Image (cartoon, helix red, strand yellow):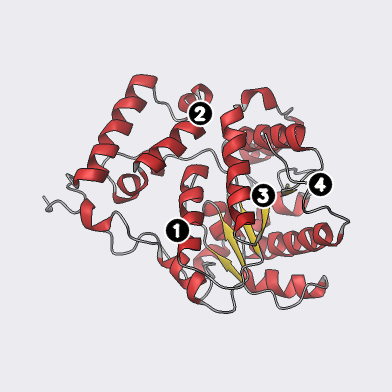
Amino acid sequence: MSAPSARADVFTVRPALTAAATDSQTNLVFFGSSRVQNGFDPEVFDFAMAESGVDDTHSYNVGLPDEVLAEIIIDVERFFILRPKGIRYVLFEPNLGGLAFFAPNTQRSIRLFSLHGAYLVNQMMSGRLQRAMDTTEPDYALRALTLLAQHYTGLSWTPPEKEYAPWYPPRGHPREPRENGSLKDDEAYAEGVRNIETFKPQPEDITDAQVRLVLSLARHIRAHGAIPVIVTTPQYVNFWLTHDLVAKITKVCGDRDPLVLDFTSPTRYPALWDQRNRMDDDHLNIRGAGVYSQLLAHELARALRAPHDRDHFCSF
């Protein structure tokens, strides 16, 4: 059994955030889950931005496997504490579905559950999300209290992490041969895509608190002089959470900022759902990452060129 180790690791900053913040050329960062980490290729994106008329983009992929909205908020706060210079855009995936943030006795979950982090998690949670996580209200409360106690006392026997999370230099995308594999022909996957195509979003299933968290993050980014952009991914697992959240944000905000770039539709973006462009049902492979990064650059450039009143920001 390892000695207690959480206390010394509570304030560790992810290598990805440090790398992005200390690179003087960085002007765009993208936060999100493994769908971002595997799906966003900074080199392809920057080239496509230049093709679209937006020059000198130097982007970083700071995605983290299974990262959820509450963790993204903490990471964005930590990123700006590092005082990066020249950040123009902060893209983030409003991911609600994940389990790693709530795993028992891990450095990651202990690090998150300060009083501030616990508040964010509580605002993010809902009865529907708890059911998706297969946890009950008493189990959730007990786990949260335990993680809070571990955060402030260091009473944990989880070993120190060599790295907070895998970090792929130079700018965060794992351009490795093993990621070149394609998803095999699978009728179950095809049926799942058809279900996504025909899904009718239910914005009423998203809580007001969840929407306020998204908008508060966007305002925090804006307060640091950057343009916040909500970006979805071609999500397969727990897709309904994101569809419902985007529908609720659209209902609340209409055409007001923050910008929302939505890539959840197999009908609108069929290449992102092509099995040849996917590593597994929920992640793009290298080829798919290239397609997604090009599409994202073109859609972002188009949105930035559109007439926009930056002072017309959504409040809720």
Distance between mark 4 and mark 3 Cα atoms: 18 Å
Q: Amino acid at mark 4?
A: Arg
Amino acid bearing label 3: Ile
Q: Which of the numbered marks, if any, corresponds to residue 78?
A: 1
Q: Position of residue 29 (x, y in %)?
A: 59, 64
Say which of 2 and 126 sits in front.
126
Query: How far apart are labels 1 and 3 at the CA level?
Result: 19 Å
Q: Earlier in the sequence, mark 2 or mark 4?
A: 2
Q: Position of residue 124 (x, y in %)?
A: 51, 34
Where the C terminus falls, by quadrant? top right
Please tell me whether mark 3 sits on a helix, a strand or a loop.
Answer: strand
Q: Are marks 4 and 3 in contact (CB under 8 Å)?
A: no
- Tag on residue 230? 3
10 Å crowding of disc 1: few (<14), some (14-19), many (20+): some
**Image quadrant assignment for residue 143:** top left
Tell me: residue 12, above or below residue 217: below
Disc 4 or disc 1, which is closer to the eye? 1
Residue at the spot 49% in from the left edge and 22% down from the top edge: 127
Q: Position of residue 157 (x, y in %)?
A: 17, 47
Tag 4 and tag 1, C-beta contact below 8 Å: no
- Can residue 272 be seen here? The reply is yes
Q: Are marks 1 and 3 in contact (CB under 8 Å)?
A: no
Residue 139 in which image quadrant: top left
How many residues crowd mark 3 within 10 Å: few (<14), some (14–19), many (20+)?
A: many
Amino acid type indicated by mark 1: Arg
Q: Dot 2: what SS?
A: helix
